């Protein structure tokens, strides 16, 4: 796929959910502000303009009151959780092949970002940079990108031989970055990059199951549940926790626990799915409020009207009138 403007896979934003949850911020409410709730779970293959992703990452850090939130997000991201990009890396026989896969296939997750491999003397560098205009401060995304890229040479099993360079200047509290980017951290650097000893290149990969595996598992179950829920939202019986959990091969308790890991309550996810679907349906102008009520799982149109007022502050009829006025 080729986009006219730089874009990032929506799936990369899912890691924000467990991160915000750990800091007492509702992920669904946060994503709603940017029009991607609950689509961030239901349509992870979609692309989001890069400038919007930079802005979302900055707002995430602000909401969590964490100036280095992007690094934590990267730390919570397993290479295998990144889709085809991660699969190509993990399918490599040694670090040299893995680095080549990471660089060549960057466009699978981020179009408008490049990773170049440079081997000089005794070191190899994975240099990351963005093409075109940023449009917003990319700092948090850079933190996250380098935290994930660092996991590639880490699979060679020699963390002491890996260094992370950041163009960012030193700032108060930035020693916290060492927890996620390693102790060999160089600030005010010429490039944003991962640097490691050249001798690691021929070492066979040793995939490590770090703390991120639990988050990967929880996010996959959340995404699976959100996807099934979206397809069955019109049927009250089929959109219950027990039914959804069985559909994705989990017990209700396990699904509930994994949703909670991501800071998501099942009833809130179902409500958010109904809200999102109802807004899309009413925007088409094809259906009456009663029809939409049934289509999003309400057997009583009056209950739907009350829910719609809670979602938007106005009843469906008034909301439709506002949309028509905007179209003209």
Image: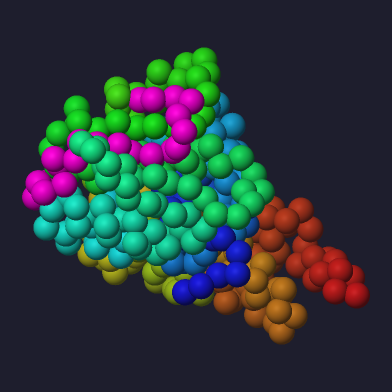
Q: Is residue 139 left or right of residue 166?
A: right
Image quarter where the C terminus lies is: bottom right
Residue 77 seen by the camera: no
Res 279 quadrant in image:
bottom right
Q: How is the image coloured?
A: rainbow
Relative depth, front residue between 21 and 142: 142
Relative depth, front residue between 261 and 46: 46
Q: Which residues are magenta?
A: 185-208
Res 42 quadrant in image:
bottom left
Q: Please name the residue shown 56% across and 50% down the image.
A: 53
Numbered circles on residues, count: 0
**Residue 75: x percent and y percent?**
33, 38
Magenta-drawn stretch contains 186: yes
**Residue 155: x percent and y percent?**
17, 44
Q: Is residue 206 left or right of residue 298?
A: left
Q: Please name the residue shown 64% across and 44% down the image.
A: 136
Q: Please name the residue shown 44% across and 54% down the image.
A: 114
**Residue 45: x percent and y percent?**
44, 67
Q: Is residue 85 left or right of residue 292?
A: left
Res 87 quadrant in image:
bottom left
Q: Please name the residue shown 33% across and 39% down the image.
A: 194
> Farthest residue toward the bottom?
286
> Farthest residue toward the front?
121
Residue 278 seen by the camera: yes
> Farthest residue toward the left?
204
Q: Is residue 141 left or right of residue 135?
A: left
Magenta-drawn stretch contains 201: yes
Query: Height in image: 160 above or below 226?
Result: above
Relative depth, front residue between 98 and 122: 122
């Amino acid at each position: 796929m080729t986009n006219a403007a730089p874009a990032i896979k929506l799936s990369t934003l899912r890691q924000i959910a467990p991160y915000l949850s750990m800091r007492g911020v509702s992920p669904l409410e946060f994503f709603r502000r940017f029009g991607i709730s609950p689509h961030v779970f239901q349509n992870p293959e979609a692309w989001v303009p890069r400038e919007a992703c930079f802005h979302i990452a900055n707002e995430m850090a602000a909401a969590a009151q964490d100036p280095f939130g992007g690094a934590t997000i990267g730390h919570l991201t397993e290479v295998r959780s990144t889709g085809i990009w991660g699969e190509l890396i993990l399918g490599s026989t040694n670090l040299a092949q893995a680095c080549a896969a990471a660089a060549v296939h960057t466009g699978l997750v981020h179009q408008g970002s490049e990773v170049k491999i440079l081997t000089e003397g005794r070191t190899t560098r994975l240099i990351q940079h963005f093409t075109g205009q940023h449009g917003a401060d990319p700092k948090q995304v850079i933190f996250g990108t380098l935290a994930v890229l660092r996991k590639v040479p880490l699979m060679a099993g020699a963390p002491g031989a890996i260094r992370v360079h950041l163009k960012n200047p030193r700032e108060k509290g930035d020693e916290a970055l060492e927890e996620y980017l390693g102790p060999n951290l160089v600030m005010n650097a010429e490039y944003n990059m991962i640097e490691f000893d050249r001798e690691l290149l021929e070492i066979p990969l040793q995939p490590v199951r770090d703390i991120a595996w639990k988050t990967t598992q929880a996010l996959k179950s959340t995404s699976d549940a959100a996807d099934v829920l979206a397809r069955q939202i019109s049927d009250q019986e089929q959109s219950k926790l027990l039914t959804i959990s069985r559909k994705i091969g989990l017990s209700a308790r396990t699904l509930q626990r994994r949703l909670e890991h991501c800071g998501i309550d099942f009833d809130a996810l179902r409500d958010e799915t109904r809200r999102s679907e109802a807004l899309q349906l009413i925007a088409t102008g094809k259906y009456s409020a009663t029809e939409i009520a049934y289509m999003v799982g309400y057997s009583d149109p009056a209950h739907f009207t009350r829910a719609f007022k809670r979602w938007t502050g106005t009843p469906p009829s008034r909301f439709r009138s506002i949309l028509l006025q905007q179209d003209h």
